[in-house]
Image (spheres, rainbow, N blue to C red):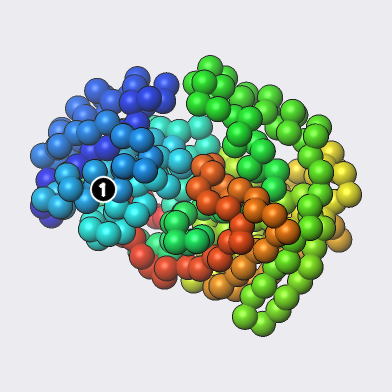
Amino acid sequence: MNRSALLVINMHSRSGKDSAQRATELLTEAGFDLKVSDTPPAARLPSLIEQEGKDASVIIVGGGDGTLNAAAAGIHAIQRPLGILPLGTANDLARTLGIPVDLEGAVNVIRNGIQRAIDVGTVNGHLFFNVASVGISCDLARELDPEVKRRFGRLGYAIAGIRVFGRAKPFRATIKTPNKTVGTRTLQIAVGNGRYYGGGNVIEEGAEIDDATLRLYSLEFAKAWKIILSFHHFRKGTHGNLEEVLTLHSDRIEILTSRPRPVNADGELITQTPAAFGVLRKAIQVFVPRNE
């Protein structure tokens, strides 16, 4: 295996800044010839990866799901295998793939060289790994600014969530697949490509990140606080059993709203409705543990 690698690490996050030197040391000890770069603004990250990574055999990204989301287009464009150092708050893609959250464990996964081809979701041409959604999650993304994440970590999600749920109101939307059209009055519509999202919630019990299927759920609760009472279902992926939750499966989905609404993908606001979703099958190779 060629050991040349581009390491892109988010120095702007608390864990990224603290872990950068140790990550570099561990990867060098593992035999990688490293080129190291800080993450630029999200819009510029794909072009940096394409330019700086063209001579590397591996792209290693240190950061959370938002950083990985920003890197996805660049990695897909140059078709290099992706190594993940989970340095974010939720680390849902790493959780889906069974990648350890400690640096030593994550570096060992990359060192071992075992790869898995995973699907990538698309929404209006933007790529995402875990989930893209319209509704409450967008309000949460606005509330949860980088300073709150840095200061409070996971507690920041709880603080922001209390504020958002207190003022959430349903909206009307139309959901289309090639075989079905559904009208809904909903608090949130989520479309999952992977298995985990939102810090360990499960998009659906049987969801996998390489099954070429998008899994949609719509939260049709009359009041947002009722979602909290069903929290254990979302942790297990059994929320589709609830009367107030609509679920659909397809490889193509459209969401239409009466006025444009933002779309949150992997924790970042990246586009707006009308939103057309698709899936790129086995689009990116990722290093995974032996027993993943």
Q: Which residue is mark 1?
A: 47
Extreme top residue here?
151
- Asked if residue 157 shows in the view, the reply is no
Residue 33 against residue 152 in the figure, above or below: below
Disc 1 marks a residue whose amino acid type is Ser
Residue 95 against residue 102 in the figure, above or below: below
Residue 189 against residue 230 in the figure, above or below: below
Task: Tell me which corner region of the image, top left, top right, bottom left or bottom right, holds residue 174.
Answer: bottom right
Expressed as whole percent of the image width and height from the top left, the position of residue 29 reads: 15, 33
The quarter of the picture where the C terminus appears is bottom left
Comparing 56 with 147, the one in front is: 147
Left or right of 97 in this view: 36: left
Expressed as whole percent of the image width and height from the top left, the position of residue 2 reads: 10, 52
Extreme front residue here?
259
Secondary structure beneath disc 1?
helix
> What residue is shown at x 65% (from left), y 53% (from top)?
260
- Asked if residue 65 shows in the view, the reply is yes
> What residue is shown at x 41% (from left), y 70% (from top)?
281
> What residue is shown at x 61% (from left), y 57% (from top)?
273
Extreme bottom residue here?
179
Left or right of 236 in this view: 147: left
The quarter of the picture where the N terminus appears is bottom left
Comparing 197 with 276, the one in front is: 276
Expressed as whole percent of the image width and height from the top left, the position of residue 234 reads: 71, 49
Expressed as whole percent of the image width and height from the top left, the position of residue 70 reads: 39, 45
